Image (cartoon, rainbow, N blue to C red):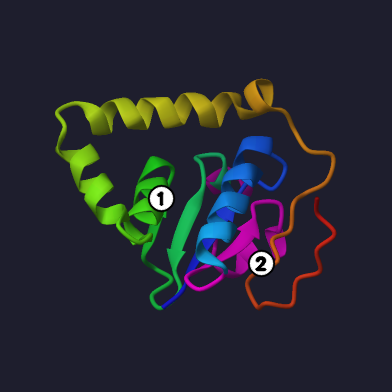
Amino acid sequence: MSYYVIYDGNCNLCVTLVQLLETLDQGKLFRYVPMQDEETLSQWGITSTDCQQGMILIDGNAIEKRWQGSNAAEEIGRLLPLGSVFIQAYRALPGMKWAGDRFYEQIRDNRYTLFGKRDQTYQSAYCLDGSCKTGNE
């Protein structure tokens, strides 16, 4: 089973989190597509306007099954080893999901101001078809 993580390849925070996920997963479960790859995203019917609502996670076996924003982050966490325990606990705490959603929105809407913007779009070594060329530092 594989999942596609659509992330902002120009956002320093987003790229750092993708790199962490790459290290943890080593391409076993997740493949990565930057939001700036409009050609690939259009194949899934995803527009730049859709991307403004935050990261997107797509189930590779059922591409109509998607999560976005904080729901995508939670689903990624749930899919990681032992992650479901933490996500269940998080969701069980009263008000935590609501607070997490608001926190995500604030970070999403202010990510460049808070964390900076990259000069070049980050391309993961674990891209859609595995044929990525990286020169990312």
Marks 1/2: CA distance? 19 Å
Q: Residue at x 44, y 43 (%)?
A: 69
Residue 108: percent from the left, percent from the top? Answer: 53, 32
Q: Which residue is mark 1?
A: 72
Q: Quadrant of residue 102?
A: top left
| Res 108 label | none
Residue 69: in magenta span: no
Q: Is residue 38 visible?
A: yes
Residue 84: percent from the left, percent from the top? Answer: 26, 55
Q: Is residue 76 left or right of residue 89?
A: right
Q: Earlier in the sequence, mark 1 or mark 2?
A: 2
Helix or strand or loop: what does disc 2 sit on?
A: helix
Q: Nearer the viewer, residue 13 or 52?
A: 13
Residue 46: in magenta span: yes
Q: Residue at x 41, y 26 (%)?
A: 103
| Res 40 label | 2
Residue 21: percent from the left, percent from the top? Answer: 53, 55
Residue 18: percent from the left, percent from the top? Answer: 59, 51
Q: From the viewer's perspective, is the residue at label 1 or at label 2 nearer?
A: 1
How crowded pointer 2 is (Cα within 10 Å; few <14, some 14-19, many 20+) is rated as some
Q: Residue at x 84, y 39 (%)?
A: 119
Helix or strand or loop: what does disc 1 sit on?
A: helix
> Magenta residues, as a range?
27-50
